[in-house]
Amino acid sequence: MVVPIEYDEVNDAAEGTSTVERAGRVGAVDLNGVLVVPMTFEDVGEFSGGLAYAARDGQYGFINPRGDAVIPLNYSSASTFRSGVAVVEQDGLFGAIDVKGNVLVPPQYEWVEGFGADGVSRVRKDGKVGLISPFGDLLVPLKYDHIGPFSDGLALVVEGKRCGYITSLGAVQIPFEYEAAEGVAQWGDFRNGLAEVQFAGKRCLINARNERVFPCVFADVGPATGTLVPVRKKTKWGYADRRGNVLFDNRYDLAWEMQNGYARVKSGELFGVIDSTGKEVVPARYQELSSNDHGLWIARLAQGTGLLHRDGREALPFIYEAVTVVRADLVRVSRNDRLAYVRLGDGRVIWKEEGFDAP
């Protein structure tokens, strides 16, 4: 994609068109950088199905890739079309329309999530949450305090002090026999076929058949993303296998979920890493430790920031103010407020700003 250097902002392309902004006005260019939607709008969204929301004089509607208004700009706000349906706002209430502008759901809700692949949307009215179809049919009555996003075909539902799980058709799959403990909306969704629940004040993991994979004996349970799962019985954390057998407990002050066979842990104020057997492959001696998509750990010691391989071997010395992994074999580093690029294979600096090596 070629876009002239004349815009303040250029968004990623969608359906061959990118939204651009200059001096507070918004339009769109094609893949050759040609302006196809004139810079006469206050806002232009991502194109989907040949339509994008657009705003002028504070009113929203939908335009085609030439900038023609296909659906009149009569709404207070609008969202991108998903599965042929877009959420719109009118007079402070939300509803939904189709690609022809036909009203599918009259604006009557305080919030409409939008329709995804499962064909349903969460909605809120008078402070209560329910589920509707793209035609506005109420699939789940507006009586719940919370309905979570669907994951593995199930959604967490909270009613008062109890919670359970429903299907996208509104059927109760797992009865309301669990406690709606503090923060359940953040930790109670299904992930990788398992959900954390609380029963009689203790946490456990269940599957979609409501079978307890972990017994309800823990004070807290982390996400089951790998071979080992973080668990806490008292004040400190350990790990259990996916059958609920505790490998070790009461060892770390914090323990994170596994990613690609490794998990961060924290002892006191220092960070380390364990592998899928529970072995501490990176000792807990680093002041900061973060992962990235290239199989490396960005770590910081008192003398500076460097890089570690997943298994704890040093990949870049700890002599920099900051390190950013650009790709698996290249990093950007800073020192003396100057930038440089270092090749990881041999540690060679392939480019640096003047003053980077100053003592």
Image (cartoon, rainbow, N blue to C red):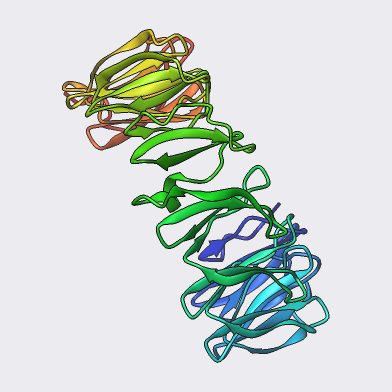
Indicate whether 58 appears above or below 123: below
Residue 317 seen in render: no
Residue 229 x, y percent position in the rendering: 45, 24
Instruction: Name which quarter of the figure residue 137 lies in.
Output: bottom right
Q: Residue at 57% of width from left, 49% of height from top?
A: 175
Left/right of residue 132 with respect to residue 254 in the rendered view: right
Residue 145 seen in render: yes
Q: Residue at 49% of width from left, 62% of height from top?
A: 146
Indicate whether 77 appears above or below 45: below
Left/right of residue 260 with respect to residue 79 in the rendered view: left
Residue 207 x, y percent position in the rendering: 59, 34
Instruction: Name which quarter of the figure residue 104 lies in.
Output: bottom right
Q: Residue at 79% of width from left, 68% of height from top?
A: 84
Indicate whether 55 appears above or below 124: below
Indicate whether 185 appears above or below 125: above
The residue lying toward the viewer, choosing from 226 and 213, is 213
Image quarter of the C terminus: top left
Residue 122 x, y percent position in the rendering: 60, 66
Left/right of residue 121 with respect to residue 196 in the rendered view: right
Most extreme residue toward the right is 100
The residue lying toward the viewer, choosing from 123 and 323, is 123
How many labels sit on residues?
A: 0
Q: Residue at 50% of width from left, 77% of height from top?
A: 24
Residue 191 x, y percent position in the rendering: 56, 38
